[in-house]
């Protein structure tokens, strides 16, 4: 075992405070990583506040991890000391179920191990990236783009893949009209990625406050959802709408913005069940679906795509001592567009 330093929540809704814990010694297939940066995802806040139930404390959050390989186990073939690597939302899975065999480890039915607030196969609780190091099996480690700054790439590991995967699955590309609801951490990556894939991109934001940013990030159109005219004007417009918002919004209203056969894809996680009117789906053969992060192979594909297209996250780097303040600002949508913790501050 080796010691790790980080920040943890001791109990539900407790502020994050300094915390020391153990990491396992690297096994044959493990990579030991010195963490340099970790993004702050809204999911970290949901879990620290136990909004999804079953949270495990003490909790070291963080699943947008970027760092440098410090050591490798004897049988590691994919990485060597000094490589720029990343770890996203998962660190293991069963490796034999139908989903794992298809490269959809995120939907593993028999043993998904999330990066934190989860348990290893031996029962040990996992601790995430708000810390100075992590030990992960090489098959769940990603290679970071060499040509891009590591800090701004950290958010690709959750926010990036969470938008890339549904954009690819529902064929966002030339000739397709895509709307992104919510210009936050996930949403701003959705705009950049959908634009790079060649789709016509619309941002649906609460107000026009972020309009200039939206256009700069690659949006063709930008509308305020607080303006009722927006819904009349955009009726039947989109092939694909991706909803990144976790607040209660009326999904039925957004379904009317889909074309016939359009898809409304949920990635944001509201705390309570959402009421749905059947006619919003029936009239137009519309579909509603969900999407969770992406598999390891697809995450690597997304990182390579970002490397080729020079796509990074727009970030505000913060020292770890400001993490609680950063959480409050995320809750107020006061971040442009992702906080990234500089682990040197530990
Ligand atoms: P975020 O940075 O806080 O962005 C959410 C955005 O939602 C805000 O920037 C804001 O955009 C909009 N919003 C906030 N309050 C709103 C309100 N009351 N009404 C309407 N819109 C509102 O959060 P994030 O990190 O992108 O995460 C978003 C959600 O996705 C979270 O629930 C998170 O847990 C979930 N998530 C899911 C996956 C997955 O695999 N499915 C992965 C990661 C995260 P505007 O200011 O533009 O309106
Ligand atoms: Zn996340
Ligand atoms: Zn599996």
Image (cartoon, helix red, strand yellow):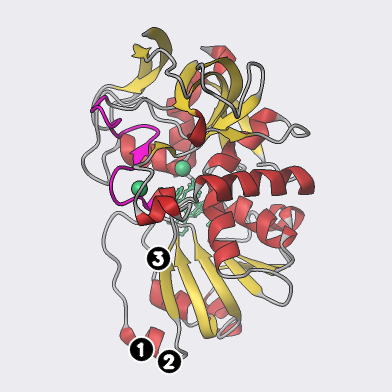
Question: Do residues under tags 3 and 1 come within 8 Å of each other at their CB atoms?
Answer: no
- Packing grade of label 1 (10 A; few <14, some 14-19, many >=20) is few
Which portion, as a residue range, is magenta?
107-124
Q: Residue furthest top?
A: 2
Q: Report how far apart the C-alphas of labels 2 and 1 lie in the structure.
A: 6 Å
Q: CA distance from mark 3 to mark 1?
A: 18 Å
Residue 35 position (above or below residue 277) = above
Give x and y (percent) for residue 165: 55, 57
Image quarter of the N terminus: top left
Label 1: which residue? 279
**Front: mark 2 or 3:** 2
Q: Nearer the viewer, mark 3 or mark 1?
A: 1
- Spot occupied by residue 53 in the image (x, y as percentages of width and height): 22, 44
The residue lying at 45 percent from left, 20 percent from top is: 28
Residue at left offset 31%, top offset 26%: 59
Residue behind label 3 places its C-beta within 8 angstroms of ligand 1:
yes
Task: Let me know if residue 160 is in the magenta part.
Answer: no
Residue identifier under label 2: 283
Q: Residue under circle 3?
A: 249
Q: Which mark is residue 43?
A: none
Q: CA distance from mark 2 to mark 3?
A: 20 Å
Asked if marks 2 and 1 touch (Cβ < 8 Å), the reply is: yes
Q: Secondary structure at mark 2?
A: loop
Apparent side of residue 76 relative to residue 215 in the rendered image (left or right): left
């Amino acid at each position: 075992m080796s010691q790790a330093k980080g920040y943890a929540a001791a109990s539900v809704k407790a502020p994050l405070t300094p915390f020391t814990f153990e990491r396992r010694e690297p096994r044959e297939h493990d990579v030991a990583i010195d963490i340099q940066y970790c993004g702050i995802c809204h999911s970290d806040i949901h879990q620290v506040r136990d909004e999804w139930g079953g949270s495990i404390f003490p909790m070291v959050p963080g699943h947008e991890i970027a760092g440098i390989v410090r050591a490798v186990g004897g049988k590691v073939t994919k990485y060597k000391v000094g490589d720029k690597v990343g770890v996203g939302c998962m660190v293991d899975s069963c490796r034999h179920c139908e989903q794992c065999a298809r490269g959809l480890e995120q939907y593993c039915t028999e043993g998904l191990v999330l990066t934190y607030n989860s348990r290893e196969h031996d029962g040990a609780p996992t601790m995430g990236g708000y810390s100075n190091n992590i030990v992960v099996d090489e098959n769940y480690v990603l290679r970071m783009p060499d040509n891009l700054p590591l800090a701004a790439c950290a958010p690709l590991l959750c926010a990036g893949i969470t938008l890339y995967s549904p954009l690819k699955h529902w064929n966002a590309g030339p000739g397709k009209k895509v709307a992104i609801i919510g210009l936050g951490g996930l949403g701003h990556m959705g705009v950049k990625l959908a634009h790079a894939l060649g789709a016509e991109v619309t941002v649906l934001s609460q107000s026009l406050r972020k309009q200039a940013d939206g256009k700069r990030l690659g949006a063709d159109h930008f509308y305020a959802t607080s303006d009722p005219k927006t819904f009349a004007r955009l009726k039947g417009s989109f092939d694909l709408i991706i909803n990144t918002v976790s607040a209660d919004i009326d999904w039925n209203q957004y379904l009317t913005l889909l074309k016939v056969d359009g898809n409304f894809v949920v990635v944001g996680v509201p705390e309570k069940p959402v009421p749905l009117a059947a006619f919003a789906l029936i009239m137009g053969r519309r579909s509603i679906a969900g999407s969770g992060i992406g598999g390891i192979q697809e995450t690597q594909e997304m990182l390579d795509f970002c490397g080729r297209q020079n796509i990074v996250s727009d970030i505000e780097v913060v020292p770890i001592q400001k993490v609680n303040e950063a959480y409050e600002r995320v809750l107020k949508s006061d971040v442009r567009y992702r906080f990234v913790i500089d682990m040197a501050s530990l």
